[in-house]
Image (cartoon, grey):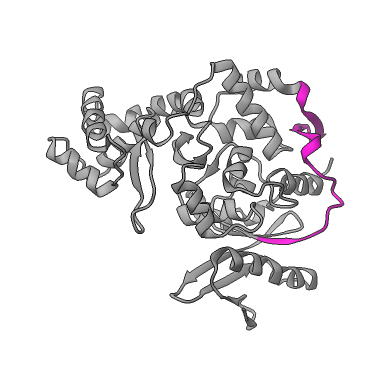
Amino acid sequence: MHQREISLRRLVSQQIAQPTFAEPGAVVRWLGAVQAQDYLGALWAVGARTPGATEQTVEQALAERRIVRTWPMRGTIHFVAPADVRWMLALLAPRVIKRSQGRLRQLGLDQATLTASAHVIASALEGGKQRTRPALYTVLEAAGIAAGGQRGLHILGQLAHMGLICFGARDGKQPTFTLLDEWVPGAAALPCDEALATLTLRYFTSHGPATIQDFVWWAGLTVADAQAGLGSVAGQLSLAHLNGQTYYYAEAHTASGDDPVHACLLPPFDELLVAYRDRTASLDRAYNGLIVPGGNGIFNPIVVYDGRVVGTWKRVLKADRALLRLSPFQPWNDSQAQALPAAVAHYQRFLGLPVMLDDRTGQATTDS
């Protein structure tokens, strides 16, 4: 297996090429988790993998609780399937909580304060209530618990990691929080070994070919736990070797390197990059600084062609249209220029708005 084949197989396993699911919740369950701190970008991450999806249909899946938004892994917000949220939190959140203790001490958030906060927040949300972050900060302050600075954000994050709260439906443009047990009461737990095996198989099936180091990064596991998980499911995976690394993948869910070439626009923090420690199969290291400027952990939206990241893009939303600016790493070649209109049209259908494209070459087109 060579780098191009790895990148093309990932397009298929991640449902970017040859998607097989018709419903947003099924896409999220397939992927295991979709990074979602950039809310609108995460809607597109799911929509790009769901034929016929629009921003409204993906958001509807969240409102109907077919997708849950919370902090299941790496201390970062993700979309997960409701059936997975409990066992993922139990498996992955304890390490995040442990790593956060130093910051909590800096903020004066001891266990007694977090316990008191949990009681206050639970009382404010019980009965199916959904409240915005500012509203919950007000509730905390009224109970004598300071929520200023970053205290309120860390309190809510800790309560989410503990499985008390998760995100609810949006209130206008504001996210809300609600009680996890009331939002998805059927969320089941799994024994630790079964949870680890489930997560491992899910990752390598939906993100493979990938290495164990990639899995450790994505899940936030220890190497020992990742190896144990891989050992329990290795018989269900194929493997290949490249440059001294072993790549695992599910043969039934990937395609050969001869798949048709196509272009796509993907959002910030897309799983195509963020899910791997080594991203060189899809991204030339020379362009790392254009994707994550200054190494600050913030991923820009990406333009992908033939399995490779070839540029970035930005959007500006107007009342009646969206303006897109594409920034290629190198001037588009003829094949790329011919493939890009279909990628823009896909995004336009998802938004439900006319899109005006400005690629900085002096060419501008409006697709209607």
In the image, is residue 181 above or below residue 197?
Answer: below
Looking at the image, which is closer to me, 265 or 108?
265
Residue extent of the magenta highlight: 235-264
* 319 relative to 176 in the view: left or right: right
Looking at the image, which is closer to me, 358 or 279?
358
- Residue displayed at 55% across by 39% down: 33
Quadrant housing residue 333: bottom right
Quadrant housing residue 69: top left
- Is 249 covered by the magenta stretch? yes
- Residue displayed at 24% across by 49% down: 134
Quadrant location of the C terminus in the rendered image: bottom right
In the image, is residue 263 above or below residue 162?
Answer: below
* 40 relative to 254 in the view: left or right: left
In the image, is residue 342 above or below residue 85?
Answer: below
| Residue 92 visible at all | yes
The residue sitting at the right extreme is 258
- Residue displayed at 77% across by 28% down: 237
Rendered location of residue 367, percent (x, y):
63, 78
Rendered location of residue 336, percent (x, y):
75, 68
| Residue 299 visible at all | no
Rendered location of residue 3, percent (x, y):
79, 46
Rendered location of residue 241, percent (x, y):
81, 33
- Is 245 covered by the magenta stretch? yes
